[in-house]
């Protein structure tokens, strides 16, 4: 089923049953779903099949980061399962990203291929500790430009960088932004955050939202409130 909404709900659940329980309350016309490392490691390709069977478009978020040949194979394997989007780490570099791009193209696979720039949980201090002296925003710009040069469809970044990336890389270049927090929500481990309405205004093309919906007392009410915020902004 195709979906017009920018919302991608992160199913960071620890069991297939719990993930499907939430999915069964969601409408594939109103959101896409993201399957990440914990759920996929526990349930494997079965979760992809189960969610596709319910009509959802899926972002398989395994953030591949390895030598070019290995990443190209992993991206191909993901795309052959029919997922809508897959990601790699831009810090894997040019040859890794080009190999992934080339592998999808050679096999006629049209899964969106995007790259994570700087994780939304990271601050300038975190970057400095791993040897990156530049501020987060500057490092995001560098990695986004490299990602675009390698022919990928877009990046994962924080919404705080989306406006600048729209100027640098254009509005067709996907800007998938996690770290989304409605005003009253707890930030948890996220650092570079924005509200849903601010993120869309800044140029995000898609919003990844997990705990503010999945951990809410009433996940459907939390989702409806976010949709309302977007509709009235
Ligand atoms: O690639 C991602 O999806 C991702 C990249 C990033 O920089 N930050 C980030 O939070 N994510 C993912 O987005 C989701 C955010 O979830 P919440 O913080 O619960 O809203 C999690 O599944 C993360 O794995």
Image (spheres, grey):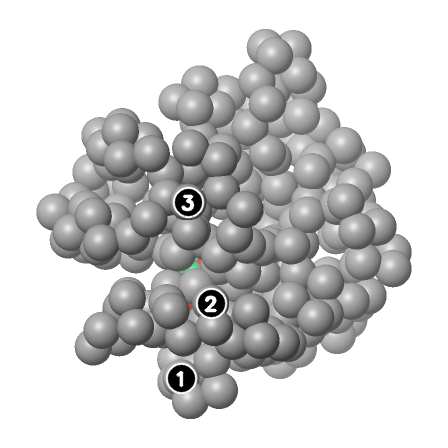
Q: Secondary structure at mark 2?
A: helix
Residue in the picture at 56% in, 41% down: 88
Task: Please tell me which of labels 3 and 1 falls first in the chain.
Answer: 3
Q: Callout 1: 10 Å neighbours few (<14), some, many (20+)?
A: few
Q: Position of residue 171 (x, y in %)?
A: 79, 51
Q: Which residue is outermost to the bottom?
A: 184
Q: Earlier in the sequence, mark 1 or mark 2?
A: 1
Could you tell me which residue is drawn at 56 percent across and 69 percent down? 231
Instruction: Return the x and y of residue 164 as percentages of the image width and height.
Output: 82, 66
Q: Quadrant of the N terminus?
A: top left
Q: Is 113 displayed left or right of 219 in the figure?
A: right
Which of the two marks, 3 or 1, is nearer to us in this view?
3
Q: CA distance from mark 2 to mark 3?
A: 13 Å
Instruction: State yes or no: discs 3 and 1 in contact (Cβ < 8 Å).
Output: no
Residue wearing tag 1: 185
Residue plotted at (15% across, 51% down):
21
């Amino acid at each position: 089923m195709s979906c017009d909404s920018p919302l991608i709900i992160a199913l960071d659940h620890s069991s297939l049953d719990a993930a499907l329980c939430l999915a069964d309350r969601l409408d594939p016309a109103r959101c896409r779903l993201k399957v990440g490392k914990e759920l996929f490691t526990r349930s494997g390709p079965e979760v992809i099949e189960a969610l596709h069977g319910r009509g959802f478009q899926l972002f398989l978020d395994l953030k591949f980061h390895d030598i070019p040949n290995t990443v190209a194979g992993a991206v191909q394997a993901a795309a052959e399962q029919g997922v809508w989007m897959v990601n790699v780490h831009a810090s894997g570099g040019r040859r890794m990203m080009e190999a992934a791009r080339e592998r999808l193209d050679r096999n006629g696979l049209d899964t969106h291929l995007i790259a994570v720039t700087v994780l939304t949980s990271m601050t300038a201090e975190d970057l400095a500790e791993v040897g990156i002296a530049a501020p987060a925003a500057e490092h995001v710009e560098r990695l986004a430009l490299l990602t675009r040069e390698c022919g990928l469809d877009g990046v994962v970044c924080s919404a705080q960088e989306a406006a600048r990336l729209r100027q640098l890389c254009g509005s067709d270049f996907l800007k998938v932004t996690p770290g989304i927090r409605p005003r009253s929500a707890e930030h948890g481990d996220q650092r570079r955050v924005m509200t849903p309405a601010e993120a869309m205004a800044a140029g995000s093309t898609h919003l990844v939202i997990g705990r503010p919906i999945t951990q809410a007392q009433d996940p459907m009410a939390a989702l409806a409130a976010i949709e309302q915020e977007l509709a009235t902004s």
